[in-house]
């Protein structure tokens, strides 16, 4: 069983049943748990959440907003009392938000349903459930979301940014423009909570994938306004532009203070071996010498074959530093050539490049064979 599936385990289903039955004695907690857990072996996490929500609908003696009221009353008095150790909350409460989105997503129920999600997000982040309301009632939902930017609970303020992201992972798309969430971000980028500003940065990162100039213009305006502390603004900007830096976008480097044509010379790349097997470690080194004081951000980029015949290119951060005139920086890395859950490596010809502030080196090639 994958680690994430443990996030909604048999013990946690039993806990849901016990908490709901404590405020609604007619709820058959034992049968609910047997029904849900019996289907778990074939289900991944999101399907487990949906299945649990469906079973809540089946076994609760009331439906709609009355059922939501039961779920809200079943919550422990605070996220901390529930055992939440992070701001994200506990997966045990993910089905509750799913229930609201699945069974109360109607115009008459809208205000109370959104208020329920505002309360639930402190126990488990409700951005996925919110996407369905944005999709079906965009104008009405955005009006509520903008009000949440002033909520006393930082987890609710974070929800305002997170649920409106253009490219929220593992969630339904929303039919709004890439810039639809900017009024929300304008209110949140100076927030005192890193949980909030991390979401602001990720939201801008999504926008940057489609419209880099819009992000740079927004960051420029925010820097001028000065509502964020310098350290936090710099964090937001770096996170927002991280993928654009890996792609070598000159404007992103220049905005962050890395000259696109830095006064620095890179030596040839030295490989420990040019013949490796899958599972081996690629070891490489190079020297970077600055001729004047300059800020440097160095990435290394691996180009690899894929099973479909296309090539995959992936960048990794190698070094970020301020170099003095005449300083030589020794670069090096040991990079394991192992498949991951999302990337399967295959044998073939690989190449390695080093990018200095986006400026590419000559590639060096090496070959990888089966283990």
Image (spheres, grey):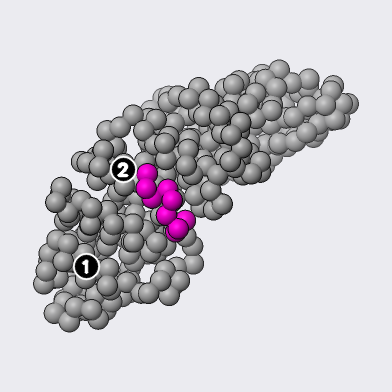
Return the x and y of residue 288 as percentages of the image width and height.
78, 27
Q: Would you identify the image quadrant in which residue 324 lies?
A: top right
Q: Farthest residue toward the right?
A: 326
Residue 267 visible in the displayed image: no
Return the x and y of residue 149 as percentages of the image width and height.
42, 48
Residue underneath mark 2: 143
Looking at the image, residue 107 lies above or below residue 116: above
Q: What range of the chain is rendered magenta?
A: 146-154
Return the x and y of residue 128 as percentages of the image width and height.
32, 49
Q: Observer-nearest residue: 276 or 109?
A: 109
Looking at the image, residue 74 lies above or below residue 177: below
Circle on res. 69: 1
Q: Considering the image in quadrants, where does the N terminus appear?
A: bottom left
Question: Which residue occupies 26% across, 38% down?
Answer: 139
Apparent side of residue 48 relative to residue 354 in the rendered image (left or right):
left
Looking at the image, residue 346 lies above or below residue 130: above
Report how many numbered discs are placed on residues in the image. 2
Q: Gap in Å between the C-alphas at discs 2 and 1?
A: 23 Å
Question: Which residue occupies 33% across, 57% down?
Answer: 118
Q: Which structural element holds mark 2?
A: helix
What crowding class fits label 2: few (fewer than 14 Cα within 10 Å), some (14-19), or many (20 or more)?
few
Apparent side of residue 264 relative to residue 258 in the rendered image (left or right):
right
Circle on res. 158: none
Q: Would you identify the image quadrant in which residue 267 lies?
A: top right
Tell me if residue 116 is in the magenta stretch. Answer: no
Question: Which residue occupies 48% across, 38% down?
Answer: 186
Q: Which structural element holds mark 1?
A: helix
């Amino acid at each position: 069983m994958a680690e994430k599936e443990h996030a909604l385990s048999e013990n946690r289903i039993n806990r849901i049943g016990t908490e709901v039955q404590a405020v609604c004695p007619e709820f058959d907690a034992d049968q609910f748990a047997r029904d849900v857990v019996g289907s778990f072996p074939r289900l991944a996490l999101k399907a487990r959440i949906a299945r649990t929500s469906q079973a809540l609908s089946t076994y609760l003696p009331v439906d709609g907003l009355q059922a939501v009221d039961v779920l809200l009353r079943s919550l422990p008095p605070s996220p901390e009392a529930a055992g939440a150790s992070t701001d994200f909350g506990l997966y045990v409460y993910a089905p509750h938000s799913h229930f609201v989105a699945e069974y109360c997503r109607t115009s008459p129920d809208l205000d109370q349903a959104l208020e329920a999600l505002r309360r639930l997000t402190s126990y488990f982040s409700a951005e996925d459930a919110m996407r369905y309301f944005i999709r079906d009632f965009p104008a009405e939902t955005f009006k509520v979301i903008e009000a949440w930017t002033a909520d006393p609970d930082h987890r609710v303020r974070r929800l305002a940014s997170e649920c409106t992201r253009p490219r929220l992972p593992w969630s339904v798309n929303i039919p709004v423009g890439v810039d639809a969430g900017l009024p929300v971000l304008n209110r949140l980028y100076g927030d005192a909570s890193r949980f909030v500003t991390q979401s602001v940065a990720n939201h801008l990162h999504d926008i940057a994938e489609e419209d880099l100039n819009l992000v740079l213009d927004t960051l420029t305006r925010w820097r001028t306004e000065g509502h964020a502390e310098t350290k936090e603004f710099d964090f937001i900007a770096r996170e927002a532009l991280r993928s654009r830096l890996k792609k070598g976008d000159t404007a992103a480097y220049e905005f962050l203070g890395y000259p696109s044509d830095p006064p620095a010379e890179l030596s040839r790349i030295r490989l420990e071996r040019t013949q490796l097997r899958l599972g081996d470690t690629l070891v490489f080194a190079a020297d970077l010498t600055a001729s004047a004081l300059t800020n440097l951000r160095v990435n290394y980029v691996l180009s690899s074959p894929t099973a479909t015949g296309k090539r995959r290119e992936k960048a990794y951060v190698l070094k970020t530093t301020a170099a003095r005139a005449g300083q030589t920086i020794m670069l090096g890395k040991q990079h394991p050539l192992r498949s991951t859950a999302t990337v399967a490596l295959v044998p073939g010809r690989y190449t390695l490049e080093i990018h200095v502030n986006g400026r590419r080196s000559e590639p060096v090639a090496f070959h990888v064979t089966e283990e």
